[in-house]
Amino acid sequence: MPMSDRLEIAGRALQRPLCNHCLGRLFASVSRGLSNEQRGVLVRSSIPDAPPPPEDVTQCHICKGLLSEVPKFAGLAARSSQGYEFATFLVGTKIDAELIEREESFWTEVGAKDTEGIKAEMNREIGKLLEKSLSKLADFANPEMVFLVDTRFDRVVLDVAPLFVYGRYRKYSRELPQTRWPCRECRGKGCPRCGGKGRMYEQSVQDFIGPVVVRHAEGTEDFFHGMGREDIDARMLGNGRPFVVEVRRPMRRTIDMGSIEAEVNASGKGLVELFGLRMSTRAEMRSIKESTHPKTYRVRLRFQTPVDHGKLNEVVTSLAGKPISQLTPQRVVHRRADLERLRTVRHMTVESLDGAEAVFVVEADSGTYIKELMHGDEGRTQPNVAGIVGVPCEVVELDVIAIGDTGEGSDGKGIKGV
């Protein structure tokens, strides 16, 4: 836009009383490195006989003095964050809708095209003061704290970013679910079925780990995100299952991982073992939840009658490296869609055979229903071990002995102790 056109816009704009901030915002994209207030001073000085800004800033046609309150809002924000540990922040503001409408109408009236909204200026100017007073950095991508400043009621609401902690766990109990399991009858409220506890199971892996992390971070609640999950009656051994604990509204972000591990392992001795704790991110949490790494299992089977090695070798030949089809198992179809899933048994060996009892080691795609691969689930998994052998079987014990990720965070024990 030619300079003459800009001066014409400025001349029309100055027919109304404007503070330098609101005058400068009309030309916000014209020059860089200046504040809107500085821009307004330059524009005003470029017009002969231009009226000065109103002595009473509340007489500004657009902001009615709101921009003069920036220091007050920055002070409110700083005080509201006392006690919280954070390194980065962002500011958002709520501004009276009538003011926004008045500003946009004024832009149309004077023909301004290079404008910036008052909300953007408020966010930036409050943020600049907070950077100085708090010695923190503004971060537009992943702020640890967001100040939501409601300029209408002089109120600041804090949006505290969650804290994410990565680790791996081993589970040695066959009576422990991974996460809290609300009672199906009362959905957590407490009823005769659950003895008033609101849960199907009194403890979970999450209960051993989550509350300890929350306490160290001084947060409000925890959410447990695992790389898949094992059945309640299956142990999780070997290199452990990766997980991320998400802590809501943490006041502390510098926490002692060694102390947390020691505390969890002392309380969960014989049930849960935790290792490899470190800080994590939302992106890693999502990656863990969406992962499709293969798993390796040790399965102890009991056939109805003794079987021989020849039959078991036939099983390995028929299944190893081959695809299988699985309909949603009968045991979970009441809570999951009844779909067909195609999975691959990547590797399979017979570890031992003693009459009617056999032990297999199976590596399979993520999401493979291993119990159903063994007994067939009344034909819903094809092919299956029982069908190939020709003798019905049941799963006596199931252990996960390896997760096929990179093993980051592992303590190097591999699959020992299984």
Image (cartoon, rainbow, N blue to C red):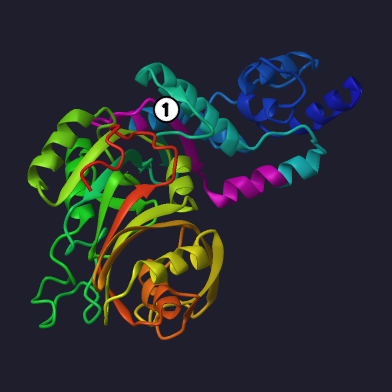
Left or right position of 116 against 261: right
Judging by the rendered image, the residue that carries numbered circle 1 is: 88
Number of on-image labels: 1
Question: In the figure, 241 relative to 305: above or below?
Answer: above
Q: In percent of the image, x 28 and y 66: which residue is there?
A: 358
Q: Quadrant of residue 249?
A: top left
Evaluate whether residue 169 shows in this view: yes
Evaluate whether residue 230 shows in this view: no
The percent coordinates of residue 106 (x first, y second) are: 72, 42
Q: Quadrant of the N terminus?
A: top right
Segment tinted magenta in the rendering: 77-104
Q: Nearer the viewer, residue 338 or 415?
A: 415
Q: In percent of the image, x 59 and y 26: which residue is there?
A: 54
Does the magenta-highlighted stretch encompass residue 324?
no
Badge 1 density bin: few <14, some 14–19, many ≥20, Cα 10 Å: some
The percent coordinates of residue 133 (x first, y second) are: 37, 18
The percent coordinates of residue 397 (x first, y second) are: 24, 65
Does the magenta-highlighted stretch encompass residue 83?
yes
Going by the numbered disc 1, the residue's amino acid type is Thr
Question: In the figure, 288 relative to 398: above or below?
Answer: above
Q: In percent of the image, x 42 and y 25: which residue is there?
A: 71
Q: Quadrant of residue 88?
A: top left
Q: Quadrant of residue 113?
A: top right
Q: In percent of the image, x 31 and y 38: which residue is there?
A: 414
The percent coordinates of residue 6 (x first, y second) are: 84, 26
Question: In the figure, 221 relative to 359: above or below?
Answer: above
Q: Nearer the viewer, residue 275 or 110?
A: 275
Q: Nearer the viewer, residue 82 or 213?
A: 213
Q: Nearer the viewer, residue 296 or 213?
A: 296
Q: Secondary structure at mark 1?
A: strand
